[in-house]
Amino acid sequence: MSKSVRNILIAVGALVIVITAAIPIAMLLRPGTIDPGNDSSTPTYDSNTTTTPWQPPETDPTEPDDSALLGESESHSEDGQTTGYPTQNNPPTYPAANPTTRAAAAPRPTTTRPTTARPTTAVPTTKPTTKVPTTTKPPSTQDLFGQMVEAHGEPEDGRSLLSYKMDPNEGYFYTETNAWQRNFGFNAIYDTMAPVTVMFYDTVRIKFTYAYPGSESLDWMIQMWKGQYGFLFLGAEIGVYHKPEGRSNGGNIEHYDCATDANMLGMEIRMYNKGEVAFRRPYKLYWWVTGFVSGKLDKYADRSQLMVEARITFKDNNMARLFADGLDAAGFEKVSKLDIAQWDTYVQNGKDVLFVWKYIKQSLNGK
């Protein structure tokens, strides 16, 4: 990449930071969260839409017509068919006047009433339940201090906004792997402009040159941040950057590229706010591990109410030692065992470097 192209990227990157204020703007439009108490798979019932059971007609069509009785205008034959109105050839007959013996009345024809049972609509007596699949409890693992904690994983898919996502389980925001910021790299100019976008944070940069087996020699920079992001969010970050050894953009600008997939490092990070865990990012490969939660510093100028504990796994022991040496030069104290009550300390364990960061900070302009 030519020097002019890199300078253009630097300028564009700085402008993007001013325009977007990255995190605050993205997360003000955060996607809705899942309410675990609402099981949408359970059917509901509306009394207004319940089907009315079948009702038989009020008049049974098979019941004989009472108009067929003697003296009415219609008569019926034995088979139940209408015979028509009386005529001269078929005059009506009347009982004799004052009969001495009353003739027995003709029996009223009977028709068997249908015995078909009324259909019934089964109404559930209890609300049906849908079995909710049980979630297997995640396995336990050791945290940075050897304590057994529940393993935590994040969904790989899901909605994002300007490359920011929200973890539905613990409610923090974070950046996805291929975030748009990965195209712009990083340099101290971005930090210098941060207060313009209402971002007030502490930062530490650890720089060294190294070529792990099978790779070219690169100038590496591991940078971390913690502080206020906009008016609404607290957060912490660790970024992995590198550039060809000795590359310069002229002047005092040291512009680094974001780490490639091959140069991502295993990391985990946990941020505390006033001693309480604000978020924790699970251990996996990152080039940039981030976490943001709603909150506000008591004093923007004092970011020490936030504390970060982190673990970084390097390519080999020698690379880890170079990073540890950088922590030592920045003011961190080497200890034999990490203790959260001992801030600004670190321990190297083979390829792993673990540290607790609270007070140490470097100049935003890189000097």
Image (spheres, helix red, strand yellow):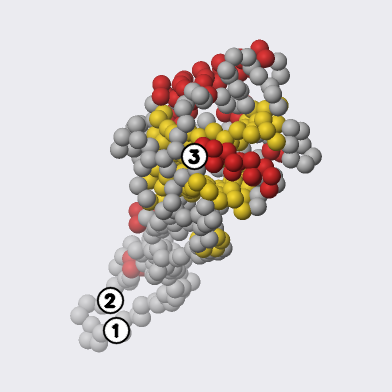
Tell me the distance, in whole angstroms, between the alpha carbons under discs 1 and 2.
Answer: 9 Å
Q: Is residue 57 left or right of residue 311?
A: left
Identify the image quadrant of residue 110: bottom left
* Residue drawn at the location 41% of the way across and 36% of the way down: 227
The residue identified by callout 3 is 331
The residue identified by callout 2 is 95
Identify the image quadrant of residue 67: bottom left
Between residues 276 and 353, which one lies in front from this camera angle? 353
Between residues 261 and 111, which one lies in front from this camera angle? 261
Outermost residue, right direction? 214
Marks 1 and 3 in Cβ contact (< 8 Å): no
N-terminal-most mark, 2 or 3: 2
Q: Is residue 189 above or below residue 61?
A: above
N-terminal-most mark, 1 or 3: 1
Categorize mark 3 by other alpha carbons within 10 Å: few (<14), some (14-19), many (20+): few
Categorize mark 1 by other alpha carbons within 10 Å: few (<14), some (14-19), many (20+): few
* Residue drawn at the location 57% of the way across and 35% of the way down: 206
Q: Quadrant of the N terminus?
A: top right
